[in-house]
Amino acid sequence: MSEGPATRPFLVERDRCATCGTPGAPFLTLPYDAEPLVGYLERFYAGALDTSQLAGQRYELVECAQCALVYQRGVPVGDALDQLYGAAALHDRDEANQSRGLAVRQRYSHDVEQCVKYHGGEPAHVEVLDHGAGAGLWLDMAAAYGCRTAGTELSEAGRRRLAEHGHEALDPGELPRARFHFINTDQVLEHLTDPRGSVERLAAALRPGGVL
């Protein structure tokens, strides 16, 4: 009897630092399909992530010997990215909205207010981008101030959700050049497979004097 096609692993391993390219070895390694990780993932994603896809794979942290960056060796790619940061992370916008307390909303407000003041103009003339916008709550605050808002999301469903809430939705791989006054990347860079390349693309999307 012939075997079916091999299942693609949910994570792929990188053998060098995501920032400087120096090889490294893990200093922490834990199985994904045992406690404490399997229970944490099920609770964090409220059952929306199929944790069986991580069976036999390990959570490994590596500290770069050159630049001291601590990074995760196994990273999701392709369809796994859409599952993890799309359907699983964004399965309930109302829940995400309710989980952001006063302190978080005050920080969002402070971010936007300082951005508008820095550029010295009316909010309607300030263009902001939230890279990895998630449920779009930071953009909601920027829009409340009157800024022109755009956000990126990996999944089509995520981009559709942003558009439904009045924000321009962009593919993260197709950023415009020299357009934005301010780019927000809250809790994003540590999840990317190529953080250095992403920062370079984001910097190119800033207009002169813009802030990332």
Image: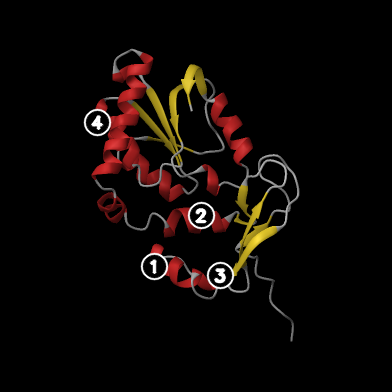
SS state under label 1: helix
The quadrant of the picture occupied by the N terminus is: bottom right
According to the image, what is the colour scheme of the structure? secondary structure
Mark 1 → mark 2, Cα distance in angstroms: 19 Å
SS state under label 2: helix
Amino acid under disc 4: Ala
Tag 1 near tag 2, CB within 8 Å: no
User: In the rendered structure, which disc, 3 or 4, sits on the residue that comes first in sequence?
Assistant: 3
Q: Which residue is mark 2?
A: 82
Disc nearest the viewer among 2 and 3? 3
Reply above or below: 202 against 39: above
Amino acid under disc 3: Tyr
Residue 43's disc number = 1
Out of 86 and 59, give the one closest to the viewer. 59
Residue 32's disc number = 3
Residue 193, position in %: x, y?
61, 47
SS state under label 3: loop
Q: Residues within 10 Å of mark 1 (few under 14, many from 20)?
A: few
Mark 1 → mark 4, Cα distance in angstroms: 32 Å
Tag 1 near tag 4, CB within 8 Å: no
